[in-house]
Image: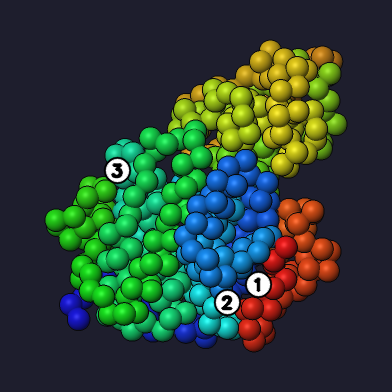
């Protein structure tokens, strides 16, 4: 087989074994799966989930795959719905350099096939590792600034490759089949920022998961596709969606440097890019016992890219409230917490919160900041000024969530959906995922 980025990556995935995963990578992947499941449970409260559920149910009538916090649907239906649930309330992971939410496209199709085939926990863990590593490498190789300048959204374009890799491991695809799976994944790559501010921006994730499922299942039947979907001069992903990209990143250090370890997790349901500002404000509240009645001005500095997306966004509905920097800063001060109840109409329509947000919260573009760095400044009625400057958010690789914090996030998300026994069973099974003989024991615990 000709040595190309697609072929080399396909060979790496086809030959990857559980023993090839370093211990740190295994544990990190368990964190990602745990977080994805917690995010999906939280997502059951998303406003538009009922519409995605109706679509997923309409795809067929068989019931071979479990919905997290729900019942059973078809492989396609469960994959699509679970993927949307993971991202529904804006609390899932993010690969910050490429603004790519990775687990919605990888975990749901892997979970569906592992459940169907009675796969082991080791097999699931390996599949998710393969999917995350593949998609992060392709996302980095695509040259994100040029890609973003064309209006593309990473989850819908790159996500299918992650799902296709996960399926490749679970279905035992050989190198040629895996390469075909990549070609089939790339043929379904889509999704642009024209949909920003609407639920369709999250539909990209669930469509990406379904595309990965279809790519893997079709490649298993030896369906042929492009031999080089990434760098082909006529319609390869890197040329059609970017400026040629950096193909060497895709294959450099395969199996030695695990890029999936740079995926960040979120502690709070809110836009990923303002988690740094949220981290800073929570730190100030904890340190100085700040109260809304004592705050004259709350000023938040964001980079231009983050300010343009979140700095002036209104909070007129739940989805916009989850993305609005002014509202989120205000509600943290008022409630001293940030979870789903802070984004219900009774909170974002509260006159006192609304007035405080409009009159005392000032979100500005700070030209000294890059990426998701943030500066939070609070001036109090006593004349004091407190400042917190953050280069990263809680949950980023430089300040990661602990396993216990992710477990607590799942416990909080599961309230009203799963019994306490099922929640603790899920946590135990995921903590020792490598010892699980049959993933169906896990999916049984996840059903409502």
Most foreground residue, 286 or 437: 437
Q: Which image quarter: residue 292?
A: top right
Most foreground residue, 322 or 361: 322
Of the numbered discs in the image, which one, if any, rests on residue 443? 1
> How many numbered marks are there?
3
* 303 shown above or below 70: above
Residue visible at 63% across and 56% down in the picture: 40
Q: Most extreme residue toward the front, as rendered?
A: 61
The answer to which of marks 2 and 1 sits earlier in the sequence is 2
* 271 shown above or below 399: above
Q: Which residue is mark 3?
A: 146
Q: CA distance from mark 1 to mark 3?
A: 40 Å
Q: Which residue is mark 2?
A: 115
Residue visible at 38% across and 56% down in the picture: 158
Q: Could you tell me which secondary element the residue under label 1 belongs to?
A: helix
Foreground tag (2 vs 3): 2
Question: Mark 1, residues whose alpha carbon is within 10 Å: few (<14), some, or many (≥20)?
Answer: many
Most foreground residue, 204 or 311: 204
Q: Assign the N terminus to one quadrant of the image.
A: bottom left
Q: Could you tell me which secondary element the residue under label 2 belongs to?
A: helix
Marks 1 and 2: in contact by CB < 8 Å?
yes
Residue 165 appears in the rendering: yes
Q: CA distance from mark 2 to mark 1?
A: 7 Å
* 338 shown above or below 441: above
Q: Which image quarter: residue 122?
A: bottom right
Residue visible at 37% across and 82% down in the picture: 173
Find residue 268 and report its horizontal and vertical position in percent: 68, 45
């Amino acid at each position: 087989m000709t040595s190309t980025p697609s072929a080399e990556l396909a060979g790496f995935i086809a030959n990857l074994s559980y023993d090839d995963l370093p211990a740190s990578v295994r544990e990190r992947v368990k964190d990602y799966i745990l977080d994805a499941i917690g995010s999906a449970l939280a997502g059951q409260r998303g406003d538009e989930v009922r519409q995605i559920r109706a679509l997923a149910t309409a795809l067929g009538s068989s019931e071979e795959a479990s919905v997290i916090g729900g019942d059973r649907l078809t492989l396609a239906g469960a994959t699509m719905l679970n993927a949307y649930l993971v991202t529904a309330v804006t609390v899932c992971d993010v690969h910050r350099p490429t603004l790519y939410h990775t687990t919605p496209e990888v975990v749901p199709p892997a979970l569906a096939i592992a459940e169907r085939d009675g796969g082991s926990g080791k097999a699931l863990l390996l599949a998710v590792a393969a999917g995350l590593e593949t998609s992060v490498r392709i996302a980095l190789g695509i040259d994100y600034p040029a890609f973003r300048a064309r209006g593309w959204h990473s989850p819908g374009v790159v996500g299918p490759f992650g799902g296709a890799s996960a399926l490749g491991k679970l279905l035992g695809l050989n190198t040629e089949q895996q390469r075909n799976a990549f070609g089939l994944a790339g043929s379904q790559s889509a999704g642009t920022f024209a949909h920003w501010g609407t639920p369709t921006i999250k539909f990209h994730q669930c469509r990406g998961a379904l595309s990965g499922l279809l790519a893997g299942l079709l490649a298993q039947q030896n369906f042929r596709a492009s031999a080089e979907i990434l760098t082909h001069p006529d319609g390869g992903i890197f040329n059609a969606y970017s400026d040629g990209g950096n193909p060497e990143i895709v294959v450099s250090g395969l199996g030695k440097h695990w890029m999936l370890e740079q995926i960040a997790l979120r502690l709070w349901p809110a836009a990923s890019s303002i988690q740094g500002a949220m981290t800073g404000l929570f730190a100030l509240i904890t340190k100085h016992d700040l109260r809304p009645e004592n705050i004259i001005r709350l000023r938040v500095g964001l980079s231009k890219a983050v300010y343009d997306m979140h700095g002036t966004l209104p909070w007129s509905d739940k989805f916009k409230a989850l993305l609005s920097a002014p509202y989120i800063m205000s509600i943290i001060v008022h409630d001293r917490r940030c979870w789903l109840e802070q984004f219900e109409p009774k909170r974002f329509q509260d006159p006192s919160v609304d007035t405080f947000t409009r009159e005392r919260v000032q979100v500005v573009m700070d030209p000294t900041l890059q990426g998701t760095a943030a500066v939070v400044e609070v001036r109090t009625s006593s004349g004091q000024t407190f400042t917190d400057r953050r280069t990263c958010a809680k949950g980023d690789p430089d300040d990661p969530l602990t396993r216990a914090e992710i477990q607590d996030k799942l416990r909080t998300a599961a309230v009203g959906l799963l019994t306490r026994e099922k929640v603790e069973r899920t946590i135990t099974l995921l903590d020792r995922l490598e010892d699980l003989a049959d993933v169906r024991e896990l999916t049984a615990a996840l059903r409502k």
